[in-house]
Image (cartoon, rainbow, N blue to C red):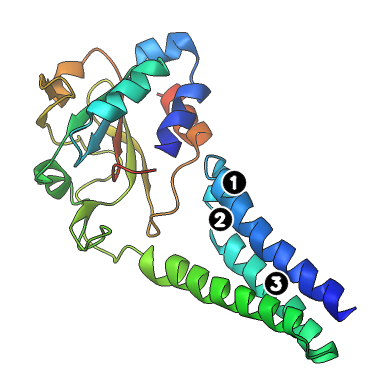
Amino acid sequence: MAELQGLGAALSEAERAGVEVVAVSPDRNEQSQRLADGLRMGYRFVADPDLAVTRQYGLLHRGGGPRGQDVPRPATLVLDRDGVIRWLSLSDNYQIRPDPADVVRAVRAL
Amino acid sequence: MSLALALLSVVVSVGTVIGYASLLGVPAVRNHPEGYVAAFAIAATIAGLAVALRRRWPAWVALGVALVLLAGGGYVNFVMARIPPAPTMVRVGERAADFTLPDAMGRPISLRDFRGHKPVVLVFYRGHW
């Protein structure tokens, strides 16, 4: 969540309206959505409980969860209006998440 | 002197734990996890110096605390948090595969809904921090 919260703060209100932030997680997300709505960030949380989309994107971290279950590896993608990937952040250490300032720069560069 | 060094070592150890945990939201801190490993190594070195000066229990305690944190922190950063290399389907310049997933209200959301309208920041995350 840390990177998501930072992203909301780094975007101006007008920019938040002009870009869709879609957060994919294995959770059911009601709680995350309430949190984001409370912070008025305009994120959309979508649930991928069986990790089908995560697998389709090749972003599965096998056995990486706290109980040895498969989880998504942290990834942030910036897509332009045509759905083409224009910027990408992938890490080989799950503690490391992109700096929201870099994500915002990538969005502004579109 | 030995007691002062032991105390300094504990301050560095505990300060690193509290500092890192409370600054997780700051990218410069979060994205340099090797920093806390280095800090624990410094704390262990200071405590080792304290033990060398005078073999009294405060120095041993400080050394024990620093070594446990160093081993734990090293394990988390260099073993546990590593994501093994795996082929990914995402490349800059390629179109992101379309998908439809339910949002928090259960409404289906498709990536193609935004095509032609808005850029999308797509974040895959684990559910916690």
Residue B107 occupies quadrant: top left
In the image shown, does B30 or A92 lie closer to the viewer? B30
Amino acid type, mark 1: Ala
Please determine if labels 1 and 3 lie on a single subunit.
Answer: yes
Tell whether A73 sits left or right of A40.
Answer: left
Amino acid type, mark 3: Ala
Quarter of the image with the C terminus of chain A in it: top left
Please determine if labels 2 and 1 lie on a single subunit.
Answer: yes
Residue A83 occupies quadrant: top left
Q: Is residue B74 visible?
A: yes
| Foreground tag (2 vs 3) | 3
Q: Residue B94 placed where, x, y %?
A: 22, 39
Question: Can you identify the residue that label 3 sits on?
Answer: B43
Q: CA distance from mark 1 to mark 3?
A: 21 Å
Residue B107 lies, with reference to residue B3, above or below; the image says: above
The local crowd at label 1, few if under 14, some if 14 to 19, many if 20 or more residues have their Cα within 10 Å, is: few
Which numbered disc, 1 or 3, marks the residue that appears first in the sequence?
1
Question: Can you identify the residue that label 1 sits on?
Answer: B28
Tell whether B87 sits left or right of A50.
Answer: right
The local crowd at label 2, few if under 14, some if 14 to 19, many if 20 or more residues have their Cα within 10 Å, is: few
